[in-house]
Each structure stands twice: as C-alpha cells, then as structure tokens.
Image (cartoon, rainbow, N blue to C red):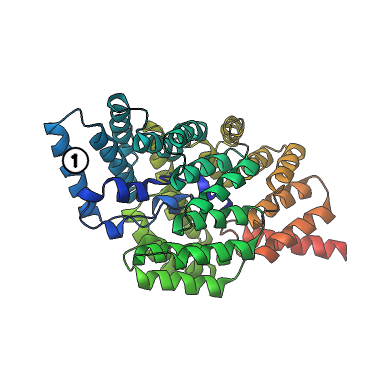
Amino acid sequence: MKRALWALGALVLAVALLVAGVLGPFQPDSSRGTPAVAPQDAAALAAPAADGAGLDQTIVTLQENLRSNDQDWRSFASIGLAYLQKARLTADPSYYSKAEEALRRSLELGDDDNYQALLGMSVLAAARHDFEGALRWSRRARSANPYNADVRAVMGDALVELGRYRVAGQTFQKMIDLRPDLSTYARVSYFKELHGDFSGAVGAMQLALESSGAPEDAAWAGYQLGELYFGAGRLGPAERRYRRGASLAPDYALPKVGLAKVAATRGHFAQATRLLGGVVEVLPVPEYVILLGDIYTAAGDLKRAREQYSLVRAIQDLYRANGVQTDLEMALFEADHDIDVAGALRRARSQYQVRRSVAAADVMAWTLHANGRFEEALDYSNEALRLGTRNALFYFHRGMSQLRLGRSSEARSDLERALVLNPNFSFLYSEDARQTLERLESGAR
C-alpha cells in the first residue's frame, strides 16, 4: 500500500543472483534462486527464494568445507551470502550477524579482488538500513569488479534511499546497459514510479515479468505489477495480477498479501484477515503485521488490532538487536497510530539527517503533523512531492496539514487528488479523506 516506502524494509538486495552464481556448485537447484530484486519494503525480504531445504543443505556443505579448511576465504564469502539469503527466506534478522562474521572473515583472508564479500557487505548494510555504509561498500565492490550489474544495482538502491536521485538514475542506466533482466528492469520500474511515470513503471515491470525464469520469479514480478495498479486505484487489474501470481506459485506469500488487500478493500474482512494471517504466521514482517492490524481496525476488531501492533514493536526490537535501523519505519507507525508522537518526530528527524529521500521527507511531514507543527509539516510534504511521485498518501498528508492551517481550497485540492489517484489508499485514512473532502466541498458551496 505504501509503494513509495518500497525501499524501507529489511532489504537483501542483490544476494540472490550472487547466491546463484557464487554458490552454484553447492546449490542443489540453482534454477530456483531468487532474483536480485529491487527494494520494496517487506516485499523485498519476501521475494522468491531458493527452497529452504536446498539452502540449508548449501549452508551445511559450506560449514563442513570450512571445518576442514578455515582459511578458505571464498567459502566464507559464500556462506555469508547464504546467511543473507536465509534471512530473506525466514524473516529472521539474527542471520545478519552470522553473515557479517563470515563476510568480514572472508575479507581478512582474501585479497583486494574479493568482490563477493565486498558486495555482500554492501547488501548487508542495506539490509540494516545503513545506506551510507551500503554506498561505501558498493564503491569498493565496483573497484574490484567495475563491469558487474549487481554492484550498480546495490549502489543505485543506496543512492535512492539517500535521496541522491540524479546520480541514482545514472547508476541505474549503467546497470541496465550492463545487464537487462528481471532484477534491473524492476529497479528501473521503481525509479520511474518515483518520478510519477506510471506507464513507464508498468512497462519496465512488464519487461521484468517477461524476463523471469522460475514461477516464483514471475509471481514476484506479477505482484509488483499488481501493486502498481493497486496504488493507481485500479482494483480489477491489480486483482488479476495478484491471482495470476498466486496460480504460478501457490506457496509464495506476496500474491496472498495482494489478494488480502483487495478483499479488505471490498469489505470482505474475514477473507482478508485469513489470507494475511496465514502469511504473518510464516513470515512475520512488520509491514504485513501492521497491515493486518490496520485491516482489523477497519473491521472494528480493535482487540486483535492492538495485538498486531504490539507484535510490531516486538519484531522491531529484534531487528534493532541485530543491527537493523528501524527508526524511520517506527516513526511512521507511531504517527499513524498516535503512539509517542514526540519520540516519533525525534526518530524521523535523526534518520532524515542522513536519508533525504522523498519517503523520509513524507515521514517527517506526518510526524510533524502529529505534533501539531503544521507549517513545518507542509514544507516537508512539498519536499516529498518534489519528484512528482503519484502517491495518494503523500497528498493526503499534505492536505491534512493544509486543512489545519485553514487553507481550505488547498486542502480540498490535495484530498481530491489523493482520492482520484487511489480511492483506497489506506485502511486507516481513506474514509477520513472522503468525509473531510465532503465537508470542505459542502462548505465551499
């Protein structure tokens, strides 16, 4: 639902193709390797992954190899990448610490051309939301392997998160020149979406879909197409793409998340919570847990909603304990749910100092709004919309600050824009936007 926060989840950006390439000799079924997908909130974490049994066997084989030769820097790099893949597959951030230990050992033992470990460290830094670190590591990886698309992909992801869009665009262009495939087309799609180019984003994601190999890859790309259509308020096309993904890979989580959103939007809350509850049981990612809580709220089941919101905080504590920076995500969650809004603003500001992205600007706007600082909130909302991103939530946030400042005409324009872009942009706020707009229009007549 919050496509502009695509890159804020627990990212494991380019590890899949690295695992397929670096671990190829150890992997029982490399054709099922995960594509190096573009970042997209929790969806990146849940991108199609090699089967758990195959990955576990890879790790066991590498562990046995290292027991017999603890100076093998290549195996340390490989097992570090495998742990990153395991973190993606299980949503267990404790694998990040294992990955870091193995990758650092590989760098200690290896030479300056240890590209796999350098890129693995970049992926790890991005997964922990240390995007300055991800950029530094990816630059070192580029020096070791200047003609590899993966390093440009991770570098571009970091630049996007840091709000350096011009350089990110140049980096992605070099990436796609080096290797047009599912991974690189998906990143181009997101970049176009950020700049308000809906048709370009759909076209690039369609190319990603056509480049997919395994059914899980196609289901992932199909889900992303569904998200684009859902964000544009086109429920029918979104549902068709979610259903297609579910038929291609019945055990894959993301299409079920999409179908749950469609069901909830149509008022079928029991179906929605059943679908999404099943996903959360096996993949307790904060984004999905928050979504489940919000759907319970929309359904009027506040007790179950509170249970999900409590679980979010427990999961975020686990992430922080394993080095994942969660302040920006928690700031938005707290502002949305009226929890410690003063602390939410502090957390948002601390992250905005290093992450000047449009998404971070929007979080700043909303946390300032929650603290009654509407003039400042409006400045950040304007910044969040500087690229022309067609995000209904951004317009809603700006419209509500305009309203509190007594600027009825501007508020009406923003709220109308939000609802035109996507009449179902939020299970918490869509109805509020409609009712507020009706009052404004009534007062204007």
Nearer to us in this view, 14 or 320: 14
The residue closer to the viewer here, 307 or 367, is 367
Q: Position of residue 151 (x, y in %)?
A: 46, 42
Residue at 71% in and 40% down: 380
Number of other residues with Cα within 10 Å of mark 1, as a class: few under 14, some 14 to 19, many 20 or more: some
Whether residue 423 is situated above or below residue 307 in the rendered picture: below
Q: Report whether 14 appears left or right of 419.
A: left
Q: Is residue 313 left or right of residue 53?
A: right
User: For this rendering, which residue is in front, 2 or 123?
Assistant: 123
Residue 311 in sight: yes
- In the image, what residue occupies the spot 42% across and 54% down? 304
* Picture quadrant of residue 395: bottom right
Task: Write the residue at 62% across / 39% down.
Answer: 164
State the residue lying farthest toward the top. 108
The answer to whether residue 156 is above or below residue 432 is above
Q: Is residue 374 left or right of residue 271?
A: right
Location of the N terminus by quadrant is: bottom right
Q: Position of residue 126 (x, y in %)?
A: 46, 39
For residue 141, above or below residue 179: above
- Say which residue appears at 55% left-offset and 75% top-offset: 236
Residue matched to label 1: 62
Q: List the single residue furthest toward the right.
A: 445
